[in-house]
Amino acid sequence: MWFTMDNSSRPKINETYNAMVVSSSKQWRKCLYGNEEFDDNYTDPSFLKDLRTNSSVRSFTIEEAVKGVTRLNNQISCVTIFLVIFYLLYNELVMPPSVLLMTAISISIGYIFHRGRKLFQLQCILEDSKTLLTVSVFGYIFAPLLHRLTNAISTDTIFSMTFFVLLLNLIFCDYGLSAALVSKALSLNAAVFASICLASRLSTVFHAYVLVDAAILFVLYPIFTSLYWRWYFLLPIFGTCSILLYKISFNILLTYVLLTSFINIGCPCIFVTQQRYKHNINGPWDEAIVKENTESIIEDNL
């Protein structure tokens, strides 16, 4: 039986034949300059032998997700309390000395828990008192300037800008996870900038000083929560915010309750159910990770 072969198919047969000859004569190696006989787009089956799927992925339970997200709700409650303080001062519903007294009591209680056994060390008390006195004095000195700082800007613009910078505070806040997005400095600066913007809308200089002084809450409260936070601490904080918001507006209270409920219940459920779709691959193509030569790593290598 005779048959003819199309000339267009001959190059394909030749390439296949050459590849078979090369593969039989020399074995492919994972070496940059040791595979001159192979084509540039050649991929050996042994290349994927080091493939790992979801090697560093951790699965979370619904309980762990719910307890972990309470840190976010805690920071939202912290921002809510600060805004409630501004609302009370803005509408003259509370006297500034009362807010200043409550701030001092809160700082004192937090300081006692933070220092613990070091509370009775004279040197430690002097250093902390010096820091507190410096912040208070400079805050009082610059309060007139802060009060007049944004007079040329409309109140609506100030409130809109405050919303966005407080949103930045929530996004970049440290919730106990090591991530590239976390930035304590940016989160703190956003909160301080928000307090300065809101302080310029108050009626007197002393009102502005009290509100800026209350912004210390964004400095000390994260330190306290990072050391002593437990998930059930959210219950009294949530109750306090709910009572304060109920006295202001029922619609705001409803918004706060729905938002915190969705974050604390809806988001963990969505996160846990979507975990099965994770598909991370690791292999020899990954970038090399350079470890810092700390003392523990050096001792392990010796």
Image (cartoon, rainbow, N blue to C red):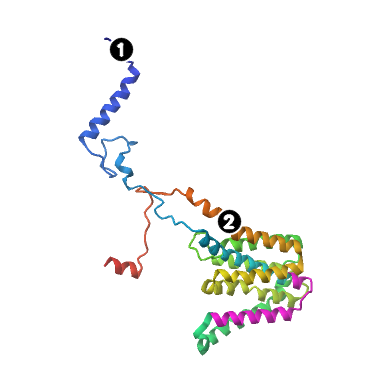
- Residue 174 sits inside the magenta stretch: no
Q: Which circle marks residue 4 in the picture? A: 1
Residue at x 24% of width, y 34% of height: 23
Q: Is residue 158 visible?
A: no
Is the residue marked by circle 1 packed among few (<14), some (14-19), or many (20+) residues within 10 Å?
A: few
- Type of amino acid under label 1: Thr
Residue at x 59% of width, y 59% of height: 265
* Residue 13 or residue 246, whichever sits in front: 246
Q: Which residue is mark 2?
A: 267
**Marks 1 and 2 in Cβ contact (< 8 Å):** no
Q: Position of 191 compared to 6: left or right?
A: right
Mark 1 or 2: in front is 2
Query: Quarter of the image containing the C terminus?
Result: bottom left
C-alpha span from label 1 to label 2? 67 Å
- Type of amino acid under label 2: Cys
Compared to 49, does 234 lie above or below? below
Q: Secondary structure at mark 2?
A: helix
Q: Position of 98 compared to 77: left or right?
A: right
Of marks 1 and 2, which one's residue comes earlier in the chain? 1
* Residue 171 or residue 250, whichever sits in front: 250
Chain part drawn in magenta: 87-113
